[in-house]
Amino acid sequence: MNRVNDQMKKYGTNRSVIRDLFEYGNQLRKEAGPDHVFDFSLGNPNVPAPEKVNETIRELLASHDDIYLHGYTSAQGDPNTRQAIADDLNKRFGCDVKKENLYITCGAAASLKIILTALYQDGDEVIAFTPYFPEYKVFTETTGAKLVEVSSDPDTFQIDFGLLERAITPHTKSLIINSPNNPSGVVYTEENIKKLAALLNEKEKEYGHPVYMITDEPYRELVYDDIKVPFIPNYYKNTIVCYSYSKSLALPGERIGYVLVPEAVDQSSDIYAAVCGAGRALGYVCAPSLMQHVIEKCTGLVSDLNEYKEKRDLLYNALTDMGFSCIHPDGAFYLFVKSPVADAGAFSEKAKEFGLLLVPADSFGTPGFVRIAYCVSTDMIRRSLPAFEKLAACYK
Ligand code: PLP
């Protein structure tokens, strides 16, 4: 008799293509030596957190007792941490967030899983724009809801409003938007955010119920060349924010982020209660205490953006000069490159022959592209260029 949950077995067995490539890289490093592997698979930020983060950790360890540092906090998060986050958001975005609107989580993945669990029931639909973070599918399917993919404009990777209008139905409970985007690096323009807000307002009136916008924002601060990322609750009332410090403070292994349910959101206090319930049902208990205290002192800081910009410019310019076609990324730390052949998996396999680990983007809902995570050392990017030249030559 089968004693295993088959859905969970499927997620555990059919692992993420990104993780598989990363494991392959570890193996190859052992076999061929680290200098022969150019691993662009994982979004593991290599630009360190601002020094204040480590200083704060040292100060905390020196001056506080173990229970303060390592004990449980309240499930929704330490009140001082939530107040510090609210103050920072209000200062930067001119909004009116209160600590009671914030729920501290173990990063954006947990934030998303918690909000989807809080909102979703069987038969509900959530819209995501391609390309999207592949875990959305796992997080959605495990609530019994359906992920509806809407293709983005193929030239700009901005929202295709014609396709979106056709995809929204009375079953659409929310949309997930991710800007700056993983994997395209695209930042949605203010004009498009306003257009999206207007469309959703119209649909809410037509259906007589809210359509929530869930913003997945781990890259909010990672933008270059003075590009501005609109703070979406200021444009659309029914916005719920999922944030993470994984990328802005280079802390992905420390698991810290939050869900923001602004007061203006329809049924805000019910949703907040359901967020607390979902955190409980999923067994999160509370986010890591030490990191919560670090965030109290460091929220709003960001790693050195000039370093990321240097890497982006170096790789983008080199690859486009070689003839690769790639959308110019304004944010995050990924290049989204069109595969020279229809099968991006075959292209990724060919790249492996030169030690290049590039993620085929089929699982992001966009076959025919690969993702290159350039959050790696600038030295490795420079050393990888001859390998990219060889790869390009295969398709000339
Ligand atoms: N959402 C997007 C778009 C991401 O790229 C990632 C991680 O790469 C996550 C969510 C999950 O981030 P976290 O490490 O905060 O769970």
Image (cartoon, rainbow, N blue to C red):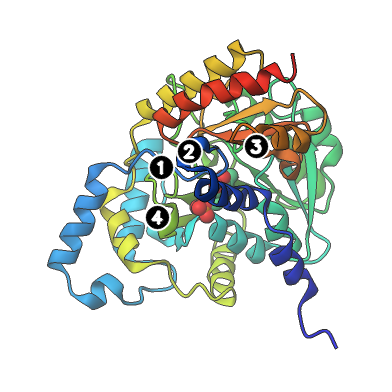
Q: Which residue is mark 2?
A: 220
Going 35% across and 39% down the picture, which residue do you hit? Answer: 302
Question: Can you tell me whether the CB of the residue at mark 2 lies under 8 Å from the nearest atom of ligand 1?
Answer: no
Between 374 and 135, the one lying in front of the other is 374
Residue 256 in sight here: no
SS at mark 2? Answer: loop
- Distance between mark 4 and mark 2 Cα atoms: 20 Å
Residue 127 in sight here: yes
Task: Kindly check if marks 3 and 2 are in contact, taking CB atoms under 8 A apart as contact.
Answer: no
Q: Nearer the viewer, mark 3 or mark 2?
A: 3
Q: Which residue is mark 3?
A: 352
- Distance between mark 3 and mark 1 Cα atoms: 30 Å
State which quarter of the image contains the C terminus.
top right
Task: Kindly check if marks 2 and 1 are in contact, taking CB atoms under 8 A apart as contact.
Answer: yes
Can you give x and y, in whole percent of width and height, for residue 155 in the image? Answer: 73, 20
Q: Nearer the viewer, mark 4 or mark 3?
A: 3
Going 76% across and 38% down the picture, which residue do you hit? Answer: 345
Q: Which residue is mark 4?
A: 98
SS at mark 4? Answer: loop
Can you give x and y, in whole percent of width and height, for residue 116 in the image? Answer: 65, 60
Task: Identify which amino acid the numbered label 2 is placed on.
Answer: Arg
> Which tag, 2 or 1, sits closer to the chain's start?
2
